[in-house]
Image (cartoon, rainbow, N blue to C red):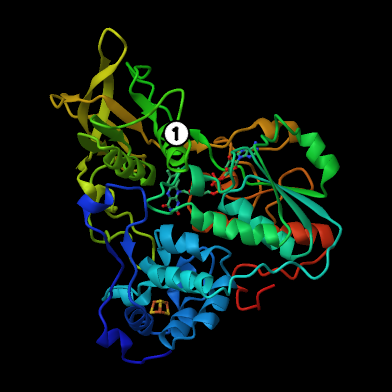
Amino acid sequence: MGKITGFLEFDRKVEAYAPVEERVQHFKEFSLRLPEKEIKDQGARCMDCGIPFCHSGCPLGNLIPDFNDAVYKGKWNKAADILHATNNFPEFTGRLCPAPCEEACVLGINEDPVTIENIEKMIAETAFEKGWIKPEPPKTRTGKKVAVVGSGPAGLAAAQQLNRAGHLVTVFERDEKAGGLLRYGIPDFKMEKHIIDRRLNVLEAEGIEFKCGVNVGIDVKGEELQNDFDAIVLCGGATIHRNLPIEGADLKGVVQAMDFLPQNNRRVDGTTTFENELLATGKDVVVIGGGDTGSDCIGTSFRHGAKSVSNFEIMPMATAERPEDQPWPFWPMRLRTSSSHKEGAERFFSISTKRFEGDKDGNLTGLVTSEVEWIKEPGKSMVLKEVEGTEKEWKCDLALLALGFTGSEMTIAEQLGLEADGRTNIKATEKDYMTNVPGVFAAGDQRRGQSLIVWAISEGRQAAYHVDTYLMGASELPLKGEGDLPRV
Ligand SMILES: Cc1cc2nc3c(=O)[nH]c(=O)nc-3n(C[C@H](O)[C@H](O)[C@H](O)COP(=O)(O)OP(=O)(O)OC[C@H]3O[C@@H](n4cnc5c(N)ncnc54)[C@H](O)[C@@H]3O)c2cc1C
Ligand code: SF4
């Protein structure tokens, strides 16, 4: 522990944001880095707890007190080593993670928790700026070949770990560029895409082969993969979005978030023409769905120059404080207000969309909602009930559906004869991440359902350990909780 009285001397500080009127003019990141002195003070707030609950809150088991201490002492290189021992891509999580570690931080019981996420980002950025993140190709090769399907955070983490173990790794990605939802879901204003390219350059230099524009199951069949590779890791994500099957859902102007957001990311990347341009410019936009995806639609709409943006959430409004029945150190379901919400969106809770309305040409002109309440009877699950007399009409010419994801696509799973659960998540337990077919593994959202980047990286790492064990009989790759091993 660097400074015994650190948490008494310094208040929590987090990165500030550029003013709204300035940041909505562009798609670049807009958080303002804390000066080095201030981030060191934040590291000094860490109490180096005997039982660091931040560890258990982090799906990667990041060694948080250790890197906090190194940062406080200005030992940035050591901090980068500690961080990379458990996390392949701290520059992604340092920007995008909802930071379950901070909710679990012991200081959070009666004070503001340690600013772990900002510290993580600063370590990662310093390491890149100083040139400490270098390709680390394996010294020897095993001669085994592994196919990774999908290049989101799960696929990239699995690929890097397996390559470090000496296997020849090929990543298949159907999009034109690698990155998964990091590239074609999450908007640039949350993470600019050169951050992904910078890391991909390192992975390529380490010897990983990327085959983009290849749709596995269509362009390359499952059997071909089985013939050509010694193991397969499926990291295809949870790509099936939920629909809203109500009257008017086929009107022009009712758009899935996962059509709207990827198109915008491609536009920012330089693709200038689309068959069907999806723009919020000058429109009254309603974003249906109150999660991360909905929030990203709000920020994107403001940057297009929307006339108004409203956000509907079917669940009641949570409290900003931790609810009593979700005590520390658990992840609380509390009201989260993103930077996009703060850009001027009006939020409505306990509201359900009943139908869309359009003109004679099939264009969306409005929608009708009613208020709802959630009734809980003892021993039964919650039931949704419409509140009579609360019907309301809204003017709307773009409705963005951000209703979550129901599971993964089954083409490759069917070709390989894989079992899946009722939500089409591929069955593979955390015991070894192997499916019912020997040599075929699954990780990330395709296994656990729609989740978080930090979980995807964690699953990719864990799966890699088990693939390596399957191929070689044993593995020296670190498992979660063994992150104090030196970098492999
Ligand atoms: C809009 C949005 C915003 C989000 N924001 C956040 C956030 O701020 N923080 C956070 O922690 N999480 C966020 N998430 C969730 C997070 O992005 C995912 O949990 C994470 O990306 C899952 O990683 P993955 O590697 O399992 O899958 P993905 O990132 O979905 O990657 C899967 C990849 O597999 C490819 N693929 C699928 N099938 C095939 C095939 N047959 N052949 C070849 N390639 C294939 C896909 O094209 C894709 O590139 C967000 C999700 C969305 C949709
Ligand atoms: S729980 Fe908080 S204060 Fe304790 S070691 Fe972890 S980051 Fe530091």
362 or 283: nearer the eye? 283
Image location (x, y in percent) of residue 455:
52, 56
Image location (x, y in percent) of residue 451:
48, 49
- Picture quarter with the N terminus: bottom left
Query: In the drawing, does residue 333 fall left or right of residue 270?
Result: left
- Residue 245: image quadrant is top left
Image location (x, y in percent) of residue 356:
28, 20
Give the residue drawn at x 37%, y 29%. Answer: 278
Give the residue drawn at x 36%, y 40%. Answer: 381
Secondary structure of residue under mark 1: loop
Query: In the drawing, does residue 353 fall left or right of residue 36?
Result: left
- Picture quarter with the C terminus: bottom right
Image location (x, y in percent) of residue 138:
76, 68
Query: How many circles with numbers are drawn on the protein?
Result: 1
Query: In the drawing, does residue 224 fall left or right of residue 42?
Result: right
Query: In the drawing, does residue 227 fall left or right of residue 73?
Result: right
146 or 63: nearer the eye? 146
From what the image shows, is residue 267 above or below residue 72?
A: above
Give the residue drawn at x 26%, y 76%. Answer: 111
Residue type, numbered disc 1: Thr
Q: Residue 230: tell me if it is visible.
A: yes
- Residue 478: image quadrant is bottom right
From what the image shows, is residue 393 above or below residue 140?
A: above
79 or 332: nearer the eye? 79
Which residue is farthest bottom?
4
From what the image shows, is residue 43 above or below residue 137?
A: below
- Residue 215: image quadrant is top right
Residue that label 1 marks: 272
